[in-house]
Image (cartoon, rainbow, N blue to C red):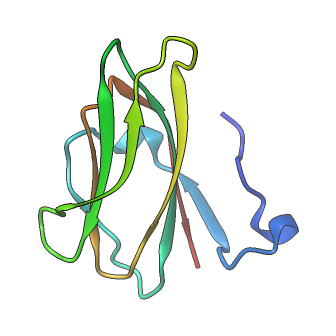
C-alpha cells in the first residue's frame, strides 16, 4: 500500500512514517518508546456485528478506549487515527484484521 501522509507536504510534526503492518498483531500490547508523541494510522476491517477498539494508556495493558469502530455492511474498512503519548502503551482488539498500520514519529 502507498503512503497515507506526506509529512513534508502536510506540514505535520512527524518526520518518519513506517509501515509496520507486517510486524503488528491484533490483541498485542505495544509501547511508544520514543520521547515524542506517535501518530497511529490504521485501516481496520470488521466482520458482521464486530466492534473494534483501540486502547491507549500509561499502564500495561492500556485501559482507555480512544477509538471504536462498528460494523456497517456498506463500509468494510475503517480508517482510524490515534495519538499515543511518549511512553504510553497501545493495542487494537476485536478487529477481523488490520489492513494497514502506519506509525508516524518525530
Taking the spot 82% from the left edge, 66% from the top edge, the residue there is 10
**Which residue lies at the image location 31% right of the left edge and 44% below the top edge?**
53
- In the rendered view, does 13 fall on the left or right side of 65? right
Image location of residue 30, percent across then percent down: 26, 60
Residue 23 at x, y percent in the picture: 36, 44
Query: Outermost residue toward the bottom?
Result: 35
How far from the left and from the top, in percent, is residue 105? 55, 72
- Residue 69: quarter of image: top left
Identity of the residue drawn at 35% across and 15% down:
47
Give left or right: position of 32 versus 37: left
Q: Please name whichever residue, 50 or 101, is drawn nearer the observer in this view of the structure.
A: 50
Image position of 105 with respect to 54: above or below: below
The C terminus: image quadrant: bottom right
Q: Residue furthest left?
A: 60
Q: Quadrant of the N terminus?
A: top right
Above or below, 25 relative to 37: above
Residue 94: image quadrant is top left
> Which of 74/30 is in front?
74
Residue 19, how many percent across, how many down? 54, 48
What is the tally of numbered marks visible in this picture?
0
The answer to which quarter of the image holds residue 92 is top left
Amino acid at each position: 500500500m502507498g503512503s497515507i501522509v506526506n509529512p513534508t507536504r502536510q506540514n505535520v510534526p512527524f518526520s518518519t512514517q513506517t509501515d509496520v503492518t507486517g510486524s503488528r498483531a491484533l490483541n498485542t500490547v505495544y509501547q511508544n518508546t520514543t520521547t515524542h508523541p506517535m501518530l497511529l494510522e490504521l485501516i481496520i476491517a470488521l466482520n458482521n456485528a464486530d466492534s473494534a477498539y483501540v486502547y491507549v494508556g500509561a499502564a500495561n495493558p492500556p485501559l482507555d478506549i480512544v477509538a471504536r469502530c462498528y460494523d456497517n455492511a456498506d463500509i468494510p474498512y475503517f480508517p482510524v487515527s490515534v495519538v499515543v503519548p511518549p511512553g504510553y502503551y497501545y493495542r487494537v482488539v476485536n478487529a477481523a484484521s488490520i489492513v494497514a498500520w502506519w506509525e508516524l514519529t518525530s
